[in-house]
Amino acid sequence: MILPDYQGGSLVNLMSSLLESFGVGSRYESLDRYDLGDNVVLVVVDGLGYEYLRGKGKDNFLYGCLEGKLTSVFPSSTPSAISTFYTGLAPREHGVTGWYTWLKELGTVSTILPFKPRFGDDSFGVDIGSVLSGNSLFEEVTRDCFHLTLDKLKGSKFNSLFGSGFETYGYSSLDEMFDLLEGVVRSDGKKFVLAYWNGLDSAAHDEGVDSVATSKEFLEVDIKIRDFVEEVKDTDTTLIVTSDHGFIDSKEEKAVKLEDHPGLEECLRLPLCGGRRTVFCYVKCSKEDEFVNYWEDNLKDVCRLYKSEELVSEGWFGFYEGDQRFYDRIGDYTLVMKEDHVLYDTIVGEEDNFMIGNHGGVSSKEMYVPLCVV
């Protein structure tokens, strides 16, 4: 079991290092300082785990740039980690705890990145700032800040909130992203650029992290990064490549479906929240003992059970108080899946959608991400 190393070895500490180099303070300890160039480019390859990169061998470009590993945040999910990249804060402070998030203010479970209810296709007709703290620390950075993301994500409410302080560009392909990157790097002035690519994450979810499709996606990204470094070698640029989380592959027989455990389902007052590897459970007050006993009798071998408040006090989510709504978003109990097990539910209108590739848990494959620096 790997927990976030917020004392000097996590994504939070990487962002602290960058922010301090840009003249913005942070309460979290920094990594060893780098001699940063006029251009600082941070490429986030969604789903690229440290162990996966190591496993690809020494022939790839990123392996040669590998300076070590960092831990993700907890949970090791895209919503929680991408919010850390934007804010420099841990989940306890920025308040984003997983893909499915209970928003008490709106009375529903949301899919937080698209910012819409879990059911239906309509987005919330409210300002996202009314439920999330959108304090992008890059508003305070004196350099010009740029954000490169997919066209379909460029105008999202989530990106608009947390991307404040950035000039945002959208792209439709990996080639276009790196063309944009080179153009930004060659523009005037000192710059910080945050670029995000999700192709590897999508392939790993659909086909599995060990699939041919995921390997092909990795090799394409690796080549593009190598070519980009060659193209901008005449500029004063520091390139940092990391990720939000890694992946494990799961087998369908290791999937625990809530509908197959009506005794557990009866104890819950809300659908499951968080993700499939770290699950936040909202338990009826009258059913708390029954919930714990059901876990003890039926699920102890597939997941660990914690009171969510215990994980807060132990520092899993970060060290400092932040958005007080965070406490509403981690449930009464947290189930952390063992080995390659997953736990999920389906609500009315949803189809059963087992995914081979999963993340969000505390295995080394999920928690460790690479730190590559050129």
Image (cartoon, rainbow, N blue to C red):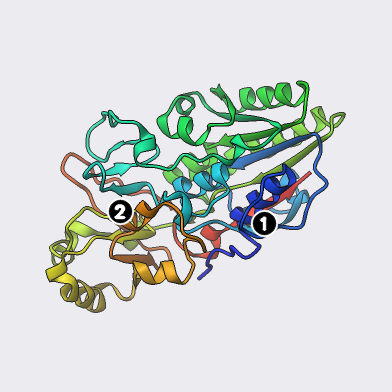
Q: Note whether 242 is above or below 174 in the view shown.
A: below
As drawn, the label of residue 273 is: 2
Looking at the picture, how far across and down is residue 261, in whole percent?
A: 18, 64
Q: Badges 2 and 1: C-beta atoms under 8 Å apart?
A: no
Q: What residue do we see at 62% from left, 26% from top? A: 177
Depth check, mark 2 against mark 1: the one in front is 2
Which is more toward the observer, 248 or 167? 167
Please name the amino acid that badge 2 sits on. Cys
- The residue tagged 1 is 54
Please name the amino acid that badge 1 sits on. Arg
Looking at the picture, how far across and down is residue 308, in whole percent?
A: 35, 67
The residue carrying pointer 1 sits among few (fewer than 14), some (14 to 19) or many (20 or more) residues within 10 Å by Cα, namely some
As drawn, the label of residue 145 is: none
Q: How many marks?
A: 2
Badge 2 marks a residue whose secondary structure is strand
Q: Separation of disc 2 and disc 1 at Cα?
A: 32 Å
The answer to which quarter of the image holds residue 288 is: bottom left
Which is more toward the observer, 57 or 327? 327
Badge 1 marks a residue whose secondary structure is helix
Looking at the picture, how far across and down is residue 203, in whole percent?
A: 49, 41
Q: What residue do we see at 68% from left, 22% from top? A: 179
Q: Note whether 131 is above or below 306 in the view shown.
A: above
The answer to which quarter of the image holds residue 92 is: bottom left
